[in-house]
Amino acid sequence: MRWPAQVVFGRGTLRHLGGHARSFAVHRALIVTDAGVRRAGIVEAVAAVLRKENIEHDVFAGVHPDPPIEDVIEAARMAREGRFDSILGVGGGSAMDTAKAASALAPSGRVLHTLYGEDHVPAPGLIKILIPTTGGSGSEISGSCNFSDHSAGNLKRFLISHHLLADLALVDPSLSDHAPAAVTAESGIDAVTHALEAFTCRAAGDFSDPWSRQALVLASRSLRVAVAEGAAAPQARDDMALAAMLGNAAADIAGLGAVHGLTHGLTARFQISHGRSNALLLPPVMAYNLAACPERFRDIAVIFGARKARAEEAPEAVAHLCADIGLDGRLRDFGVAQDDITGIATAAVARFPKHFGANPRDVTAEDAASLYRAAL
């Protein structure tokens, strides 16, 4: 179990950021974010708190969805040349992942590709403060990040290390209050997928189950409300922020399964967002995995309100959730064709053995192709 050095959770906790930053000896902070978060005024709210503590700061707002490695390199360059002692990742998973990787790269001058994989980050790097603005990825408490390498055929690149864990994860659910409904839906289904896969993966057990189960309970009662009502439903926003954290914590222990193995092959090549990819593939993968752990899928069916509380109802219950929040559809709607299936299935199984190995049921390349076809 690996957690950030400090986690602060609660509505309105952003106002305490300055004091926490000072406790970590922050003097010059680079805010890493995206253009949308900046337009929403959240970056200025963060900057205002820093100014009250006389903490110098600047902003890198060049993070893209499913960020390319170039975003990391540019953020690290700005941090290094500006002699910043800390990085504040403010936004969704893309911004926080970019901040984590840039914090490791900035002080060393290393080339990014030397850090790929597990435990190749040699030192903590710059001070890291992560502030999520969506209730979804849970990246604020994880020691991993991922990017797209367009120079290598849209490969997904991963960094996993305890050195990437935040010094402070500050989770203020009010920062997500005015997120667009589509962002709320896509980030929320990411939290659901993390929790559901952690609950059903081979390594699920006593350490991970309380967190994954509670994340599912919170999301099942609050995701629809958060999408539909936005800022008018603060409790739903709070629930989704907590579900994101708990789901990622559970996944860090139990792992993620075939849904993530399959979606990573789609986001870069077909420009399907990670949340949308999860929604398209989660129900068919659940149906495929049913036979491996029917008791757990029965629990999922109950949590998501299935009428007869049977394991077989779980995929349909989650599919209904996806439809209710606007994330129904088929892979073909996003440009995936029948002729693409064999290639992307073979590549997914070859590139993401960790996810397929954690899945409760074995997945061959042929199985992966069948799952893509079921979502086509």
Image: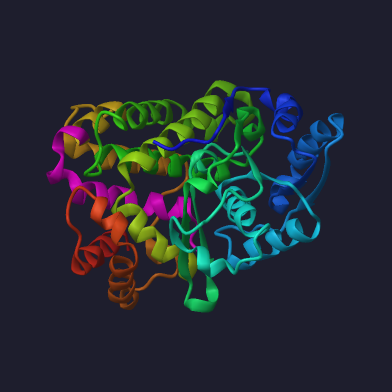
> What are the residue bounds of the magenta stretch?
271-296
Q: Which quadrant, please, contains the C terminus?
A: bottom left
Number of marks present in the image shown: 0
Magenta highlight on residue 93: no
Identify which residue, 58 or 42, lies in the foreground: 58
In screen coordinates, is 75 left or right of 10? right
Up-down relation of residue 37 to residue 260 (above or below): above
Q: Residue at x 41, y 61 (%)?
A: 264
Query: Whole-percent x and y of residue 146?
Result: 50, 57
The residue positioned 63% from the left and 56% from the top of the image is: 102
Residue 185 left/right relative to 34: left
Q: Main SS of the magenta segment?
A: helix
Above or below: residue 167 compared with residue 108: above
Q: Position of residue 186 (x, y in %)?
A: 50, 46
Q: Nearer the viewer, residue 143 or 340?
A: 143
Lateral position of residue 268 relative to residue 44, left or right: left
Would residue 287 be counted in the magenta stretch? Answer: yes
The spot of residue 201 in percent (x, y) is 25, 44
Residue 107 vs 303, above or below: the answer is below
Which one is nearer the viewer's eye here, 118 or 363? 118
**What colouring does the structure picture have?**
rainbow
Residue 352: x %, y % from top left: 33, 62
Vertical comparison of 365 with 206: above or below:
below
- On-image quarter of the N terminus: top left
Q: Quadrant of residue 265?
A: bottom left
* Residue at the extreme left: 291
207 left or right, relative to 329: left
Residue at (33, 48) in percent of width and height: 256
Residue 365 is drawn in which quadrant? bottom left
